[in-house]
Amino acid sequence: EKLDYIFSLPPKDQYSTRILELVTQSKAEAAKLIKTIEGKARGVVFARAVLDKTLRQVYSSRGYTILDEGHGVFMVKPLESDVSFRQVYGEDFFQTPLDNF
């Protein structure tokens, strides 16, 4: 089975590796990719925000500590003056680093 992926590791003098986003089609692919990153990384491997439930399970199964609580602020300015955030997104809104470009 061939996996296609792209990742970048920090400079050799940096002690930690932060996973910004991990997108796979299955738990098995996620586990393989995390194992590959662990094998090439130096020091601590961490992900600050993991929103996908399946990916959280994979991290947990590999021995990562999962912290379920955190605090943050998300500010939104409407692009259209006659529509609200709730009208567009309802009660369900998710954002990941892939949404920022």
Image: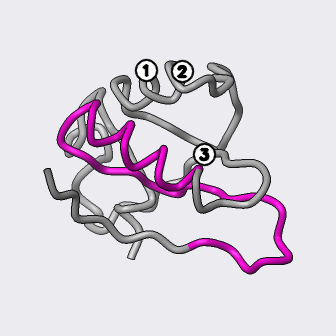
What label does residue 60 carry, if any?
A: 2
Amino acid under label 1?
Gln
Q: Position of residue 39 (x, y in %)?
A: 58, 54
Left or right, 99 with respect to 47, comes to left
Of circles 3 and 2, the one toward us is 2
- Residue at 29% across / 63% down in the picture? 81
Disc on res. 9: none
Mark 1 and mark 2 residues within 8 Å of each other at the beta carbon: yes
Q: Which residue occupies the foreground of this view, 48 or 15?
A: 15
Q: Secondary structure at mark 2?
A: helix
Residue 10 as seen in the image, left or right of residue 94 = right
Reading the image, the residue beneath label 1 is: 57
Is residue 64 covered in magenta?
no
For marks 3 and 2 on the same chain, the one whose residue lies earlier in the sequence: 3
Tell me if label 3 and label 2 are in contact, CB under 8 Å.
Answer: no
Is residue 33 placed above or below 42 in the rendered structure?
A: above
Residue drawn at the location 44% of the way across and 61% of the way down: 77
- Label 1 and label 2: CA atoms lie apart by 5 Å
Of callouts 3 and 1, the N-terminal one? 3
Label 3 amino acid? Ala
- Look at the image and give the residue range highlighted in magenta: 9-38
The picture places residue 60, in percent across and down from the top left corner, at 54, 21
Amino acid type shown at disc 2: Ser
Q: Residue at x 68, y 59 (%)?
A: 17
Q: In the displayed orientation, state which residue is furthest to the left.
A: 1
Distance between mark 3 and mark 2 Cα atoms? 12 Å
Residue 36: x percent and y percent?
Answer: 47, 53
- The residue at which mark 3 appears reads as 47
- Corner quadrant of residue 5: bottom left
Q: Any magenta on residue 37?
A: yes
> Is 90 situated above or below 36?
above
